[in-house]
Image (cartoon, grey):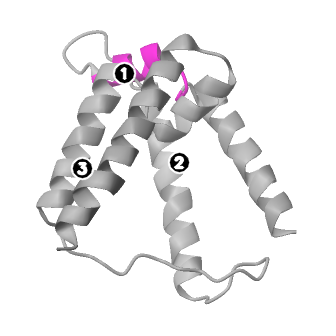
Amino acid sequence: MAHLIALLSGIVFGLGLILSGMANPAKVRNFLDLAGAWDPSLVMVMAGAIAVGLVAFTVARRRTRSWVGTPIELPVNRSIDARLIGGGLLFGIGWGIAGFCPGPALVALGRGMPEAVWFVGAMLAGMLLHDRVLVPRLSR
């Protein structure tokens, strides 16, 4: 049952990304271009996502298990450090250049968008680099 719920959640999430325009890199770049042809329509998408997230995390904090019985494991680290800031900067730069963040990039890849192939490849390479180079250095 947990796998079915995860599949349905992923489908709803993907459809939401497509319908909102988040999987369209041109729309995202126009949203990020405050000095040019700014497209404010994604503000409502982000506000809606934040509202849903706030409700979901508020409910999740009160529970130890999800509705399908799997354990809920919320992050406990609340510190703002150089790794968090650096990661946020890298994410923002990548989002601004490519017009993708990870979720919409996977949706665009599934839709067969060629630019998503490059982004997802670079994203996977960065994840591999992180796991093979950065994590072992930090655990010394």
- Name the N-terminal-most of marks 3 and 2: 2
Q: Secondary structure beneath disc 1?
A: helix
Q: In which quadrant of the rendered image does the C terminus lie? A: bottom left
x, y (%) of residue 130?
A: 30, 51
**Number of disc labels:** 3
Q: Amino acid at mark 2?
A: Gly
x, y (%) of residue 39?
A: 39, 19
Q: Amino acid at mark 3?
A: Gly
Q: Secondary structure beneath disc 2?
A: helix
Which residue position holds label 3? 87
Please rate how many residues cluster around mark 1, counting C-alpha atoms within 10 Å: few if below 14, some from 14 to 19, many from 20. Answer: some
Residue in front for this viewpoint, 5 or 60: 5
Which residue position holds label 2? 48
Specify whether 56 is left or right of 83. right
x, y (%) of residue 71?
A: 64, 83
**Residue appearing at x 58%, y 69% in the figure:** 56
Q: Which mark is residue 98?
A: 1
Is 117 located above or below residue 95 in the figure?
A: above
- Real-space CA distance between mark 1 and mark 3, rounded to the nearest whole angstrom: 16 Å
Q: Secondary structure beneath disc 3?
A: helix
Please rate how many residues cluster around mark 2, counting C-alpha atoms within 10 Å: few if below 14, some from 14 to 19, many from 20. Answer: few
| Span highlighted in magenta in the image | 22-32
**Residue appearing at x 36%, y 81% in the figure:** 76
Specify whether 16 is left or right of 69. left
**Residue appearing at x 23%, y 40% in the figure:** 90
Specify whether 36 is left or right of 15. left
Q: Amino acid at mark 1?
A: Ala
> Marks 2 and 1: which is nearer the front?
1
